[in-house]
Amino acid sequence: MAGQHPDLDPAPAFDAYDYLKIVLNPDGTITRGLDDPTTPAVPDPDHPVAVRTKDVPLDPTHNTWARIYVPRASPPPDRKLPLIVYYHGGGFILFSPSSAINQNLCSLVAAKLGAVVVSPATASAPAHRLPAAYDDAMEALRWVRTAEEEWLRERVDFSRCFLMGSSAGGNIAYHAGLRACAAAADLDPLVIRGLILHHPFFGGSQRTESEVRLFNNPVLPVNVADVMWELALPAGADRDHEYCNPMAGERSEEWERMRRQGWRVVVAGGGGDPLVDRQRELTAEMEAKGVEVAGFFGGEGDYHGVEVLEPAKAELFVEKLKGIV
């Protein structure tokens, strides 16, 4: 599984900071210049879209908020909808729940799966390094279980909740899942049934074969991922920190807890993603520990986060989730 050491990397084809359109400031913060088209929420039930959306505050003291998605057609009064809590990607440093690429995927998930989706904002690095995003992810779950928000109270079956995330959001969903599984009683009446890890963002000190082979791929160059981790991990932490490397530390107890609670886990990746080896390894390790895991792995043409950018691929991915949610 492990490949060469980063000291033996090929010459980078991209300047990571220029690729990300960020500038590292002397005080350790960053200035963001990446074009991030956003989409406003549409709470109007008469608006001609498949889902209604609205933004709600979560914790005013932390300036956190979430976007809620509900299918436009109301379910029968005696039928409540599953809940998907979706954490967006962006390497822990970019994007928000209102980013158009996140809006498109969450809208599709809500419409095609007949689910309510809550997409919370989480603290961005480097101003707020990990585990700040995990803390916010858990705060969002606590908000969901106690909120008087009518869209949730009237429509959601709180006994059918899944945590989902793309890229860094998949990493957040995984770590929030580890915490939530250990604190299941404290989240009542919210019952989490599993995880949907869409191209989850992981790393490690040693390069994997896929990281070596796809080092300079244009969608997620490995040196760009390196910079994201440098900005997101706790100060002084290396790439084998448990937040980055899912194989770091002993997870048997947490995975056994997931197994006992009957969680279903989806890990989706693409053969053209440099992170695919790490995603496959996590899938195999969890499966070996008895967790019910489904690995959805595409071919070499499926790059990192492909379903976020290609609607046809997104449709196929969400179709596969119908047997899970």
Image (cartoon, rainbow, N blue to C red):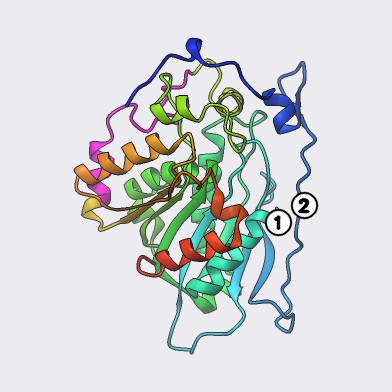
Q: Is residue 98 visible?
A: no
| Residue in the picture at 52% in, 61% down | 144
Q: Amino acid at mark 2?
A: Pro
| Residue in the picture at 35% in, 69% down | 323
Residue carrying label 1: 100
Q: Is residue 312 left or right of residue 247?
A: right
Does 219 lie within the magenta span? Answer: no
Instruction: Name the residue nearer the viewer: 58 or 36.
Output: 36
* Residue 65 percent location from the top left of the image: 66, 54
Asked if the residue at tag 2 contacts the one at tag 1, i.e. Cβ–Cβ closer than 8 Å, the answer is yes
How much space separates mark 1 and mark 2, taking CA atoms? 6 Å
254 w.r.t. 146: above or below: above
Question: At numbered mark 2, what does the secondary structure look like: helix, strand or loop?
Answer: loop
* Residue 157 percent location from the top left of the image: 43, 73
Q: Count neighbours of disc 1 (C-alpha within 10 A) and say few if under 14, some if 14 to 19, many if 20 or more.
A: some
Q: Count neighbours of disc 2 (C-alpha within 10 A) and say few if under 14, some if 14 to 19, many if 20 or more.
A: few
Instruction: Name the residue nearer the viewer: 212 or 141.
Output: 212
Q: Is residue 25 visible?
A: yes
* Residue 196 percent location from the top left of the image: 42, 54
Instruction: Name the residue nearer the viewer: 161 or 308.
Output: 308
* Residue 268 percent location from the top left of the image: 42, 50
Number of numbered discs overlaid on the protein picture:
2
> Which quadrant of the rendered structure holds the C terminus?
bottom left
* SS assignment for the magenta stretch, majority: loop
- Magenta region: 238-258
> Which quadrant of the rendered structure holds the N terminus?
top left
Residue 245, image quadrant: top left
Question: At numbered mark 1, what does the secondary structure look like: helix, strand or loop?
Answer: helix
Does 251 lie within the magenta span? Answer: yes
Choose the circle earlier in sequence order: 1 or 2: 2
Residue carrying label 2: 37
| Residue in the picture at 76% in, 32% down | 21
